[in-house]
Amino acid sequence: MLANFIQIFLEIQDKLVKALSETAFMTLTSLVLAIVLGIALGLILYITNEPLLSKNTPVYQIVGFISNMISSIPFLILMIFFLPLSSIIVGTKIGSKAVIVPLTIAATAFFGRLAEASFSEVDKGVLEAVLSSGAKKSHVIARIVLPEARISLIKNITVTAITVLGFSAMAGLVGGGGIGDLAYRYGYQRYQKEVMIICIVMLIILVQVIQTVGDLIVRGLLKRKQG
């Protein structure tokens, strides 16, 4: 059995390398965009729901509703729905580039809520003290809220990265490439369970790598904060 796995692995190694590169491209590109947009979204939600800053209930409810609506749609449906938008933005509905648009939208909505939770963990007593000293709200956000929330943000970025990786595995169903595409076309459609297992193992390894890197960064930040 092991010999059979090794033989199949050698047969698909070129395809596996290509699939890994496509998965890495989709995941990293979408993650970077989602971090930038998600932090902005999280700040909007946090600021418009924080009485010490600029509480604005209507804005909070509207933005929150849109974010929740996107998050509530299964990613496969969301991906199909936004493929026409991908055609406008990146010029194609097929391939890894096309999937980046729905991936980014889904990841931004997901991470935005996590970022809001991270910002909400910042000690309100510190905010009150800084604001009472005459500091501008923009300075409070840049110098207090963001730095104080960075450890929690890193943890949530790790969770988001793993989620995006899982979403990217569905890209194969619409010709997006990646490990999911390899598992579907060469594993499921051709009834090669060995290919399916190899792809699953690759995804597990990637998740462990992401989690380990995230944990190491958090540990380093905690040591710096305590030291």
Image: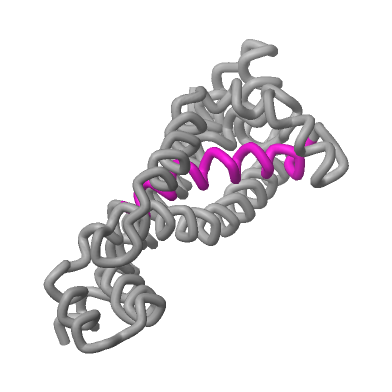
Residue 223 quadrant: bottom left
Percent coordinates x, y for residue 153 in the rendering: 35, 61
Q: Is residue 132 left or right of residue 87?
A: left
State whether residue 92 is above or below residue 49: above
Q: Of 166 and 5, which appears nearest the observer?
A: 166
Q: Is residue 130 visible?
A: yes
Residue 202 seen by the camera: no
Q: Residue placed at 59% from the left, 56% from the top? A: 33
Residue at 65% over, 47% down: 26
Q: Which residues are magenta?
A: 95-116
* The C terminus, quarter of image: bottom left
Q: Main secondary structure of the magenta part?
A: helix
Instruction: Give the image location of residue 70, x and y in percent.
Output: 51, 32
Residue that lies at the very extreme toward the left in this rendered image = 125
Residue 199 or residue 68, whichever sits in front = 68
From the top left corner, tell me how far across and down residue 202 is, in percent: 51, 40
